[in-house]
Image: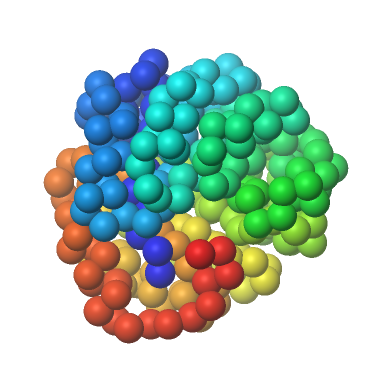
Amino acid sequence: MEIIPAIDILEGRCVRLYQGNYQQAEVFSDDPLAVARRWYEEGAHYLHVVDLDGARSGEPQNLKVIEAIARSVPVHVQVGGGLRSRNAIMAVLATGVSRVILGTIAVEAPQLVADICGEFPGQVLVSIDAKNGKVATQGWLHTSEVHATDLAQRLATIGIAGIIYTDIQRDGTLQGPNLEQLRQLATAVDVPIIASGGISTVQDLLDLLTLEPLGVSGAIIGKALYSGDLDLRTAIRAVRYQDVTIDRGWA
Protein backbone atom coordinates (compact mmCIF):
# COMPACT_ATOMS: atom_id res chain seq x y z
CA MET A 1 0.00 0.00 0.00
CA GLU A 2 1.34 3.41 -0.99
CA ILE A 3 1.38 6.12 1.67
CA ILE A 4 0.65 9.48 0.01
CA PRO A 5 1.10 12.77 1.88
CA ALA A 6 -1.42 15.48 1.02
CA ILE A 7 -0.49 19.07 0.24
CA ASP A 8 -3.54 21.33 0.10
CA ILE A 9 -2.79 24.79 -1.31
CA LEU A 10 -4.90 27.83 -0.46
CA GLU A 11 -3.71 31.32 -1.39
CA GLY A 12 -0.22 29.93 -1.95
CA ARG A 13 0.05 28.34 1.49
CA CYS A 14 -0.13 24.78 2.73
CA VAL A 15 -3.32 24.36 4.76
CA ARG A 16 -5.75 21.74 6.05
CA LEU A 17 -9.50 22.16 6.09
CA TYR A 18 -11.94 20.58 8.52
CA GLN A 19 -14.54 18.55 6.61
CA GLY A 20 -13.85 20.69 3.55
CA ASN A 21 -14.87 23.92 5.27
CA TYR A 22 -12.90 26.85 3.83
CA GLN A 23 -13.75 28.87 6.92
CA GLN A 24 -11.83 26.37 9.03
CA ALA A 25 -8.51 26.45 7.21
CA GLU A 26 -5.47 25.85 9.40
CA VAL A 27 -2.20 27.11 7.91
CA PHE A 28 0.77 24.77 8.34
CA SER A 29 3.34 26.38 6.04
CA ASP A 30 3.80 29.38 3.79
CA ASP A 31 6.04 27.27 1.52
CA PRO A 32 4.33 24.23 -0.10
CA LEU A 33 7.53 23.42 -2.02
CA ALA A 34 9.46 23.05 1.23
CA VAL A 35 6.70 20.78 2.53
CA ALA A 36 6.92 18.65 -0.62
CA ARG A 37 10.65 18.30 -0.20
CA ARG A 38 10.19 17.28 3.42
CA TRP A 39 7.78 14.47 2.53
CA TYR A 40 10.15 13.27 -0.20
CA GLU A 41 13.07 13.23 2.24
CA GLU A 42 10.95 11.21 4.66
CA GLY A 43 10.28 8.53 2.07
CA ALA A 44 7.20 9.48 0.04
CA HIS A 45 7.02 8.21 -3.53
CA TYR A 46 3.82 10.07 -4.32
CA LEU A 47 2.37 13.45 -3.37
CA HIS A 48 -1.29 14.38 -3.46
CA VAL A 49 -1.64 18.09 -4.26
CA VAL A 50 -4.98 19.90 -4.19
CA ASP A 51 -5.47 23.42 -5.50
CA LEU A 52 -8.17 24.56 -3.07
CA ASP A 53 -8.46 27.94 -4.74
CA GLY A 54 -9.04 26.13 -8.01
CA ALA A 55 -11.60 23.80 -6.48
CA ARG A 56 -13.56 26.79 -5.25
CA SER A 57 -13.28 28.92 -8.40
CA GLY A 58 -13.49 26.19 -11.04
CA GLU A 59 -10.12 26.97 -12.64
CA PRO A 60 -6.56 26.15 -11.49
CA GLN A 61 -5.12 29.02 -9.47
CA ASN A 62 -1.78 27.72 -8.18
CA LEU A 63 -0.06 26.47 -11.33
CA LYS A 64 3.30 28.05 -10.48
CA VAL A 65 3.45 26.30 -7.12
CA ILE A 66 2.33 23.02 -8.66
CA GLU A 67 4.97 23.26 -11.38
CA ALA A 68 7.67 24.06 -8.84
CA ILE A 69 6.79 20.90 -6.92
CA ALA A 70 6.54 18.71 -10.02
CA ARG A 71 9.82 19.96 -11.49
CA SER A 72 11.85 20.15 -8.27
CA VAL A 73 10.87 17.11 -6.19
CA PRO A 74 11.66 13.64 -7.64
CA VAL A 75 8.34 11.98 -6.82
CA HIS A 76 5.10 11.25 -8.64
CA VAL A 77 2.72 14.17 -8.20
CA GLN A 78 -1.03 13.85 -8.60
CA VAL A 79 -3.02 17.08 -8.74
CA GLY A 80 -6.67 18.02 -8.42
CA GLY A 81 -8.76 21.11 -7.81
CA GLY A 82 -10.68 23.08 -10.43
CA LEU A 83 -10.08 20.70 -13.33
CA ARG A 84 -13.46 21.09 -15.00
CA SER A 85 -12.47 21.74 -18.62
CA ARG A 86 -10.06 20.33 -21.16
CA ASN A 87 -7.98 23.53 -21.07
CA ALA A 88 -7.61 23.32 -17.29
CA ILE A 89 -6.58 19.68 -17.45
CA MET A 90 -4.03 20.39 -20.18
CA ALA A 91 -2.61 23.32 -18.19
CA VAL A 92 -1.96 21.11 -15.17
CA LEU A 93 -0.50 18.26 -17.23
CA ALA A 94 1.86 20.79 -18.82
CA THR A 95 3.42 21.47 -15.41
CA GLY A 96 4.97 18.00 -15.46
CA VAL A 97 2.72 16.23 -12.93
CA SER A 98 2.23 12.48 -13.20
CA ARG A 99 -1.54 12.44 -12.91
CA VAL A 100 -4.56 14.67 -12.81
CA ILE A 101 -7.48 14.15 -10.45
CA LEU A 102 -10.92 14.87 -11.84
CA GLY A 103 -13.90 15.35 -9.57
CA THR A 104 -16.82 17.59 -10.47
CA ILE A 105 -16.72 16.80 -14.20
CA ALA A 106 -17.00 13.09 -13.44
CA VAL A 107 -20.58 13.91 -12.46
CA GLU A 108 -21.28 16.79 -14.81
CA ALA A 109 -19.32 15.82 -17.96
CA PRO A 110 -18.51 12.09 -17.95
CA GLN A 111 -17.85 12.02 -21.70
CA LEU A 112 -15.05 14.57 -21.25
CA VAL A 113 -13.51 12.31 -18.61
CA ALA A 114 -13.70 9.36 -21.00
CA ASP A 115 -12.05 11.42 -23.75
CA ILE A 116 -9.21 12.54 -21.45
CA CYS A 117 -8.68 8.93 -20.29
CA GLY A 118 -8.33 7.86 -23.91
CA GLU A 119 -5.88 10.63 -24.69
CA PHE A 120 -3.81 10.25 -21.52
CA PRO A 121 -4.03 6.58 -20.50
CA GLY A 122 -2.87 5.89 -16.96
CA GLN A 123 -2.80 9.57 -16.06
CA VAL A 124 -6.37 10.16 -14.91
CA LEU A 125 -7.63 9.54 -11.41
CA VAL A 126 -11.18 10.35 -10.38
CA SER A 127 -11.91 11.74 -6.95
CA ILE A 128 -15.20 10.61 -5.46
CA ASP A 129 -15.87 12.79 -2.44
CA ALA A 130 -18.98 11.78 -0.57
CA LYS A 131 -21.14 12.90 2.31
CA ASN A 132 -23.59 10.29 3.62
CA GLY A 133 -22.82 8.25 0.53
CA LYS A 134 -23.76 11.03 -1.92
CA VAL A 135 -21.18 12.64 -4.20
CA ALA A 136 -20.16 16.24 -3.47
CA THR A 137 -19.01 18.60 -6.24
CA GLN A 138 -17.77 22.17 -6.75
CA GLY A 139 -15.04 21.95 -4.12
CA TRP A 140 -17.42 20.11 -1.74
CA LEU A 141 -19.70 23.13 -1.74
CA HIS A 142 -22.60 21.19 -3.30
CA THR A 143 -23.91 17.66 -2.74
CA SER A 144 -25.47 15.83 -5.67
CA GLU A 145 -28.03 13.03 -5.66
CA VAL A 146 -25.51 10.64 -7.21
CA HIS A 147 -24.49 7.72 -5.01
CA ALA A 148 -20.74 7.15 -4.72
CA THR A 149 -20.89 3.47 -5.64
CA ASP A 150 -23.09 4.09 -8.69
CA LEU A 151 -20.68 6.73 -9.96
CA ALA A 152 -17.68 4.47 -9.36
CA GLN A 153 -19.25 1.66 -11.37
CA ARG A 154 -19.89 3.97 -14.33
CA LEU A 155 -16.39 5.42 -14.24
CA ALA A 156 -14.67 2.05 -13.96
CA THR A 157 -15.65 1.29 -17.56
CA ILE A 158 -13.98 4.29 -19.22
CA GLY A 159 -10.29 3.69 -18.51
CA ILE A 160 -9.57 5.65 -15.35
CA ALA A 161 -6.33 4.77 -13.55
CA GLY A 162 -8.01 4.65 -10.14
CA ILE A 163 -10.46 6.22 -7.73
CA ILE A 164 -9.66 8.42 -4.76
CA TYR A 165 -12.45 8.03 -2.23
CA THR A 166 -12.86 10.67 0.45
CA ASP A 167 -15.46 10.54 3.19
CA ILE A 168 -16.00 14.26 3.73
CA GLN A 169 -17.35 13.76 7.23
CA ARG A 170 -14.08 12.07 8.21
CA ASP A 171 -11.75 14.51 6.42
CA GLY A 172 -9.59 16.51 8.81
CA THR A 173 -11.19 14.89 11.86
CA LEU A 174 -8.52 12.27 12.70
CA GLN A 175 -11.38 9.82 13.35
CA GLY A 176 -10.22 7.07 11.02
CA PRO A 177 -11.33 6.06 7.51
CA ASN A 178 -14.79 4.82 6.59
CA LEU A 179 -13.81 1.17 6.20
CA GLU A 180 -17.28 -0.10 5.39
CA GLN A 181 -17.81 2.37 2.55
CA LEU A 182 -14.34 1.61 1.20
CA ARG A 183 -15.12 -2.11 1.31
CA GLN A 184 -18.36 -1.58 -0.60
CA LEU A 185 -16.62 0.57 -3.21
CA ALA A 186 -13.69 -1.80 -3.70
CA THR A 187 -16.06 -4.74 -4.04
CA ALA A 188 -18.17 -2.93 -6.61
CA VAL A 189 -15.38 -1.98 -9.05
CA ASP A 190 -12.22 -3.48 -10.50
CA VAL A 191 -9.96 -0.43 -10.37
CA PRO A 192 -7.49 0.62 -7.65
CA ILE A 193 -8.98 2.58 -4.76
CA ILE A 194 -7.03 5.19 -2.82
CA ALA A 195 -8.46 5.93 0.62
CA SER A 196 -8.63 9.47 1.98
CA GLY A 197 -10.20 11.13 4.99
CA GLY A 198 -9.66 10.62 8.71
CA ILE A 199 -6.52 8.45 8.54
CA SER A 200 -4.51 9.33 11.64
CA THR A 201 -2.89 6.27 13.23
CA VAL A 202 -0.81 3.24 12.31
CA GLN A 203 -3.82 1.13 13.27
CA ASP A 204 -5.89 2.96 10.66
CA LEU A 205 -3.32 1.94 8.06
CA LEU A 206 -3.28 -1.66 9.25
CA ASP A 207 -7.08 -1.68 9.03
CA LEU A 208 -6.83 -0.43 5.45
CA LEU A 209 -4.33 -3.19 4.67
CA THR A 210 -7.08 -5.72 5.30
CA LEU A 211 -8.86 -4.21 2.28
CA GLU A 212 -5.79 -4.32 0.04
CA PRO A 213 -6.76 -7.69 -1.52
CA LEU A 214 -9.99 -6.00 -2.66
CA GLY A 215 -8.05 -3.23 -4.39
CA VAL A 216 -7.54 -0.52 -1.74
CA SER A 217 -3.97 0.22 -2.73
CA GLY A 218 -3.17 3.65 -1.38
CA ALA A 219 -3.78 5.93 1.60
CA ILE A 220 -3.70 9.71 1.50
CA ILE A 221 -2.72 11.27 4.80
CA GLY A 222 -3.09 14.95 5.54
CA LYS A 223 -3.82 16.52 8.88
CA ALA A 224 -2.30 13.68 10.94
CA LEU A 225 1.11 14.35 9.38
CA TYR A 226 0.93 18.09 9.96
CA SER A 227 -0.34 17.81 13.51
CA GLY A 228 2.28 15.23 14.44
CA ASP A 229 -0.27 12.55 15.27
CA LEU A 230 1.38 10.33 12.67
CA ASP A 231 5.00 10.26 11.53
CA LEU A 232 5.49 9.59 7.80
CA ARG A 233 8.54 7.37 8.22
CA THR A 234 6.72 5.34 10.86
CA ALA A 235 3.66 5.00 8.64
CA ILE A 236 5.69 3.79 5.68
CA ARG A 237 7.64 1.30 7.80
CA ALA A 238 4.44 -0.02 9.39
CA VAL A 239 2.87 -0.76 6.02
CA ARG A 240 5.98 -2.24 4.44
CA TYR A 241 6.68 -4.38 7.50
CA GLN A 242 3.46 -6.26 6.80
CA ASP A 243 5.09 -7.47 3.59
CA VAL A 244 1.80 -7.44 1.70
CA THR A 245 2.58 -7.65 -1.99
CA ILE A 246 -0.03 -7.12 -4.70
CA ASP A 247 -0.09 -5.65 -8.19
CA ARG A 248 -1.21 -2.12 -7.39
CA GLY A 249 -1.92 -1.36 -11.02
CA TRP A 250 -1.10 2.33 -10.72
CA ALA A 251 2.44 2.42 -9.23
- Vertical order, 30 against 97 (above or below): above
**Residue at the location (72% across, 25% down)?**
87
Closer to us: 184 or 116:
116
Q: Residue 197, how many percent across, how many down?
A: 40, 49
Q: Residue 144, how many percent across, how many down?
A: 68, 37
Closer to us: 186 or 235:
235
Res 172 visible: no
Which image quadrant: the N terminus? Answer: bottom left
Q: Is residue 57 left or right of residue 241?
A: right
Q: In the current view of this chain or complex, which residue is farthest to the left?
A: 228
Q: Is residue 117 left or right of residue 15?
A: right
Q: Quadrant of residue 109?
A: top right
Closer to us: 160 or 229:
160
**Residue at the location (43% across, 82% down)?**
245
Q: Is residue 216 left or right of residue 119?
A: left
Q: Residue 98, how many percent across, how many down?
A: 54, 47
Q: Quadrant of residue 17?
A: top left
